[in-house]
Image (cartoon, rainbow, N blue to C red):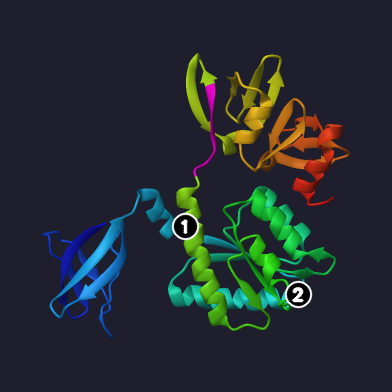
Amino acid sequence: MLKKQIYRKPGVVYWSAGELNKIEASMSGGVGYVEPPGLHITAANYNGKTISITYRVLQDDLIDRLNMTYQIGLCDDEIYQIKVNGLFLKEIAAKNDMDLEYHGFSSGAQLKKYLRDKELDILFMDIDLGNESGIKIASQLSRQYPKMVISFVTGHREFMEEAFDIDAMGYLVKPYEINRMERVLRRSILQVMALKQSVKEPEITVIDENLKKKIICKNIIYIQRQQYKSVVVTPQREYCVYEPIKALYKRVGAGFLRVNQSEVVNMDYINTIENNIVMLKNGMQMLVGRTYRKDVMLRYFGAK
C-alpha cells in the first residue's frame, strides 16, 4: 500500500508530488474523489486542509476490466420478469455509469445453447423454470463456467440453503425492489473482477520445433493420443506432448470433454452431438465411447 498527500480546492483535488495530474472530484457532503487512471483508492481522510489517500496501483489488464462491458444473463420462464429485470438493469447502469448488456432466456436449454459460443459474467437465475430446476442447472453451470457469478431470483424462500451451497452471490425473493438488485449486482461485479484477476488461464507445455512452449488451453481444439505421445491441435498448428492424455485432461480445465479413450475436445469448438457422434465446427467428427457417454451427455446437455 502507498500513501500520498493531495490538496483540496472547492470541487477539485490536486496531486501534491509535482505531477500535473488534476483530478476532478465532487466535494459536496464531505470527501469526494474520482479515482485516477491506474489507481484504486482504498481509504481517504480529510483533516480540513489535506486529504490523505491510501491507494494501490492497478495492473493494466485490471484497468481494462474496470472499463469492460459486463454481460448479464436473465433466465426466467416468465417473460414479464425478464423485461422488469432488464428495465432495472438499464436504470442501475444509467445511475452508476456502468456499461451493461443483458440477455434474456426463458429456459435452461436456451441458456446452455448461448453459453456454448458466448460468455456471461453474471447470471440471475430463476429457480422454478417449469419442468426444469434452476438450482440443478446453476450447479452444473457453476462447475462448467467457474468465473460466472450466479444469483437466484425466485418466489420461493425455501431453497435458500441449496442456493448458497453452490456459492450463489445473492437470493432475491419476488417481488423485490430495484435497490436490492443493485446491491447484488454491485457485489457480483466486484466478484467478477476478482475472479478475472485471480484465476489464471490453464496452460500446458508443448514441444515446438524441439523447444518447450506454453499454450493457453482455451485455444486448443482437441487433444488426441497417438501411440506414445499426445497431439495437441490448435487453429494454427499441431504440437506434441509426451504426456498421457489422462493427465492432460486433468489440467486443461472444465471446458473440455473426454469423449473416448483417445480424444479430449474443447466444448467451445463443438458444433453439435448427435447419435453419439461429436461434430466439431471444423467438420471433424469423433465417436463418443460407451464409457464416456453419461458424462458427455450430463456436461454438454445437462441431461441424465
Which element carries disc 2, helix, strand or loop? loop
Q: Is residue 68 magenta?
A: no
Asked whether 100 or 38 is in front, the reply is 38
Q: Residue 169: percent from the left, percent from the top? A: 58, 66
Residue 212 vertical placement versus 97 (above, below): above
Task: Where is residue 219? Give x, y as percent.
Answer: 58, 36
Q: CA distance from mark 1 to mark 2?
A: 30 Å
Task: Give the magenta-colored segment's residue range.
Answer: 200-206
Q: Which residue is mark 1?
A: 193
Residue drawn at 54 percent across, 23 percent down: 206
| Helix, strand or loop at mark 1 | helix
Q: Quadrant of residue 233?
A: top right
Q: Is residue 145 left or right of residue 212?
A: right
Judge whether residue 45 can be spotted in this image. yes
The reply, left or right, for residue 41 in relation to residue 233 is left
| Residue 10 at x, y percent in the picture | 18, 81
Identify the mark nearer the N-term, 1 or 2: 2
Q: Nearer the viewer, mark 1 or mark 2?
A: 1
Q: In the displayed orientation, state which residue is furthest to the right.
A: 275
> Hey, which quadrant is residue 232 in on the image?
top right
- The relative height of residue 224 versus residue 92 in the rendered view (above or below) is above
Q: Quadrant of the N terminus?
A: bottom left
Q: Could you tell whether 210 is left or right of 256 in the image?
A: left
Image position of 123 with respect to 154: above or below: above
Residue found at the very far bottom of the displayed protein: 29
Q: Amino acid at mark 2?
A: Glu
Residue under label 2: 78
- Quarter assignment of residue 3: bottom left
Q: Residue, x 73% and y 28% (percent of image)? A: 263
